[in-house]
Image: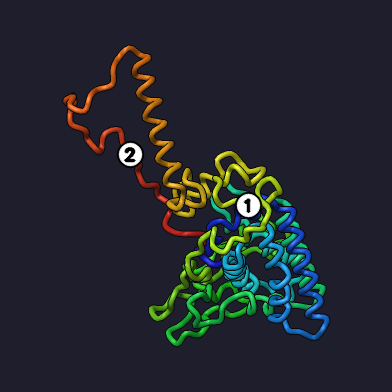
């Protein structure tokens, strides 16, 4: 079972990954090696994850991902997969842990965006790497997530700030706070033992004193995709990410419209690009003037002069005219319950 709702990835991170998924896979591979080495040298799971981040961070920086964005993405991903590993089997092996990470990545994507194949491969390799290092899922989950009582803790807590969910028991999670893996996802392919039983679990009741998590808290403060961007990082011509360009001009193979869908899902203007209101105002003004001149030329070519500043309007403008209407859909009354 995964948290509901899923924490989102920080804005701009998936553009970086989509621009060069092979490089991200290489960074994950190097991080996994550092993780295994830390465990082999007697370090605990927390030290292993720290070693992994120390290796991956600079490599992600070379891809155009600033440190704050990388850290926020790690926190968000941990908040997504940590609950699944907590509620999953205590003895889950590498393929099961890899499947949980693959499904978490898939469920975090904006509608219309697929996880690149090299990233999915890296997730499965990471699951096997943790198993090979002797790391069990419940131990990994505890280090991936913020602790109970922290605002970023991704599962409900009781009135005293203590965890409600019991490790290994998906039914201990109130139905309002969790959701099943995708029916056609990696967990489903891993076997029936990784999916809810027919009819779902007998979920614990949500009591009045329980506090639900804030999915956005896992990312911390809002991240500026251009903040602290390494000026020496490769640009689009070298496979890097340029925050001054629209995502769909540099992210490589994507489904048509995926960049727009992602921008809309993130709450921004899909056409504004990742810089949004920070775009060059002079360029915007030039574009507006150019569009106006083109419009005037088109009218002139049609044989009519554009109206002067004192020309009367034919009719008052109704702000609601030509606005599309939308009837809300009935979603059936709630999210997925395992």
Residue at 54% from the left image edge and 58% from the top image edge: 226
Badge 2 crowding class, 10 Å Cα cut-off, few under 14, some 14 to 19, many 20 or more, is few
Residue at 74% from the left image edge and 53% from the top image edge: 22
* Residue topped by disc 1: 241
* Residue topped by disc 2: 325
Distance from disc 2 to disc 1, alpha carbons, whole Å, reads: 38 Å
**Residue 70 appears in the picture as rendered:** yes
Please give left or right for residue 336 compared with residue 188 in the image: left
- Quadrant housing residue 209: bottom left
**Image: 274 above or below 138:** above
Outermost residue toward the top? 303
Please tell me whether mark 2 sits on a helix, a strand or a loop.
loop
Image quarter where the C terminus lies is bottom right
Badge 1 crowding class, 10 Å Cα cut-off, few under 14, some 14 to 19, many 20 or more, is many
**Image: 255 above or below 311:** below
Q: Nearer the viewer, residue 196 or 20?
A: 20
Please give left or right for residue 37 compared with residue 44 in the image: right
Question: Pointers 2 and 1 in contact (CB under 8 A)?
Answer: no
Q: Nearer the viewer, residue 108 or 308?
A: 308
Residue 212's spot in the image, x, y percent? 45, 73
Residue at 30% from the left image edge and 15% from the top image edge: 304
Please give left or right for residue 274 compared with residue 118 in the image: left
Q: Nearer the viewer, residue 120 or 200?
A: 120
First in sequence: mark 2 vs mark 1:
1
Residue 195's spot in the image, x, y percent? 65, 63
Image quarter where the N terminus lies is bottom right
Residue 58's spot in the image, x, y percent? 69, 66
Residue 264's spot in the image, x, y percent? 47, 49
Q: Nearer the viewer, residue 17 or 211?
A: 17
């Amino acid at each position: 079972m995964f948290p509901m709702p899923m924490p989102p990835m920080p804005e701009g991170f998936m553009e970086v990954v989509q621009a060069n998924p092979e490089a991200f896979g290489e960074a994950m591979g190097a991080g996994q090696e550092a993780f295994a080495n830390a465990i082999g040298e007697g370090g605990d799971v927390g030290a292993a994850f720290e070693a992994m981040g120390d290796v991956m961070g600079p490599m992600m920086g070379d891809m155009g991902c600033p440190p704050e964005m990388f850290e926020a993405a790690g926190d968000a991903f941990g908040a997504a997969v940590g609950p699944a590993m907590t509620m999953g089997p205590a003895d889950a092996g590498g393929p099961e842990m890899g499947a949980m990470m693959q499904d978490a990545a898939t469920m975090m994507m904006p509608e219309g965006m697929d996880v690149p194949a090299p990233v999915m491969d890296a997730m499965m390799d990471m699951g096997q790497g943790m198993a090979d290092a002797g790391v069990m899922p419940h131990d990994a989950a505890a280090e991936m997530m913020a602790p109970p009582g922290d605002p970023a803790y991704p599962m409900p807590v009781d009135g005293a700030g203590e965890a409600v969910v019991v490790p290994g028991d998906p039914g201990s999670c109130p139905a309002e706070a969790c959701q099943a893996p995708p029916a056609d996802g990696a967990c489903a392919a891993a076997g029936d033992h990784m999916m809810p039983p027919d009819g779902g679990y007998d979920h614990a009741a949500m009591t009045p004193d329980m506090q639900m998590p804030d999915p956005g808290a896992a990312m911390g403060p809002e991240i500026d995709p251009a903040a602290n961007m390494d000026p020496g990082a490769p640009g689009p011509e070298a496979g890097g990410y340029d925050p001054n360009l629209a995502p769909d001009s540099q992210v490589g193979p994507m489904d048509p419209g995926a960049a727009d869908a992602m921008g809309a899902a993130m709450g921004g203007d899909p056409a504004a690009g990742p810089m949004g209101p920070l775009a060059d105002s002079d360029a915007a003004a030039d574009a507006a003037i150019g569009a106006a001149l083109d419009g005037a030329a088109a009218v002139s070519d049609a044989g009519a002069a554009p109206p002067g500043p004192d020309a009367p309007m034919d009719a008052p403008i109704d702000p609601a005219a030509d606005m599309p209407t939308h009837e809300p859909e009935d979603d059936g009354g709630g999210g997925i319950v395992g």
